[in-house]
Amino acid sequence: EVVLTQSPATLSLSPGERATLSCRASQSVSSNLAWYQQKPGQAPRLLIFDASNRATGIPTRFSGSGSGTDFTLTISSLEPEDFAVYYCQQRTNWPPGYTFGQGTKLEIK
Amino acid sequence: QVQLEQSGPEVKKPGASVKVSCKASGYIFEGYYIHWVRQAPGQGLEWMGWISPNVGGTNYAPKFKGRVTMTRDTSINTVYMELTSLRSDDTAIYYCAKDTTVMVNNWFDPWGQGTLVTVSS
């Protein structure tokens, strides 16, 4: 099973600052990686798929990069509504399945 | 618009079974896999498996094989997830989510609102 390790566990920043979240895979997942945002009491929302593609309706301040084992989610200038928990997710073709990282909590400093 | 509407909260005793429903609307039901993901209180996300509403094919995460069954009723655009032999650590919010890509497994968007399943004696 591919293990995803996210860092840091918690990130404290102020609105307007740049956020950089990391996700590392225990083995190569090529570009088969997505990022989700989850706010308290809500279901997760897809932000980025295939490592670097923004989902429909996602603001351009969100960007994803990386391939193989190292991936980054960047929020260029934090808005108040961006403070949430972020999960990375990988997709394995064989055996077919998915795993999630443990999450990074982005909190207001 | 695409919506997934899940059934209400459940309280079950250890050893019992639970069946959660997920009703889809706003798209061609048979065209997209539905995934199930759970989240224990204060914890992360855990993928449980998927069902193809078209042919009813399933793929379960190894951890849940033997305890989970996913089915669908195409006449009412609804999928079901049944989990048996419940334990206290099955207490979680269970989400269904639509796949993003027709006829294959890809990414999850959108998600249902979640169903809280509480297992307690």
Image (cartoon, grey):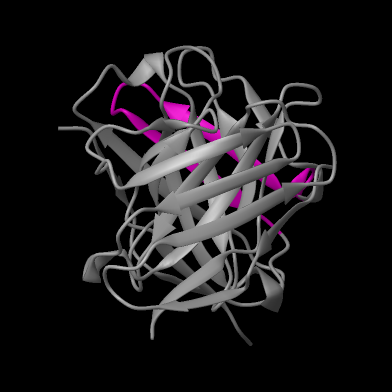
Q: Is residue B55 above or below residue A75?
A: above
Tell which of A98 and B21 is nearer to you. Answer: A98
Q: Is residue B65 magenta?
A: yes
**How many numbered dots are placed on residues in this image?**
0
Q: Position of residue B110 (x, y in %)?
A: 33, 40
Residue at 68% of width from left, 67% of height from top? B86
Q: Is residue A3 left or right of residue B95?
A: right
Q: Is residue B75 above or below residue B8?
A: above
Q: Is residue A82 left or right of residue B65?
A: left
Q: Position of residue B111 (x, y in %)?
A: 37, 46
Tell which of B97 and B109 is nearer to you. Answer: B109
The answer to which quarter of the image holds residue B38 is: bottom right
| Residue B97 visible in the picture | no
Q: Is residue A88 above or below residue A92?
A: below
Residue at 81% of width from left, 26% of height from top? A95
Residue at 43% of width from left, 18% of height from top? B101
What range is drawn magenta here?
B64-84
Residue at 76% of width from left, 39% of height from top? A69
Tell which of A13 and B84 is nearer to you. Answer: A13
Q: Is residue A11 left or right of residue B32?
A: right
Q: Position of residue B107 (x, y in %)?
A: 49, 32
Tell which of A31 and B63 is nearer to you. Answer: A31
Q: Position of residue A60 (x, y in %)?
A: 27, 41
Q: Is residue A38 left or right of residue A21?
A: left
Q: Is residue B77 magenta?
A: yes
| Residue B71 visible in the picture | yes
The answer to which quarter of the image holds residue B96 is: top left
- Quadrant into which the C terminus of chain B falls: bottom right
- Quadrant into which the N terminus of chain B falls: top left
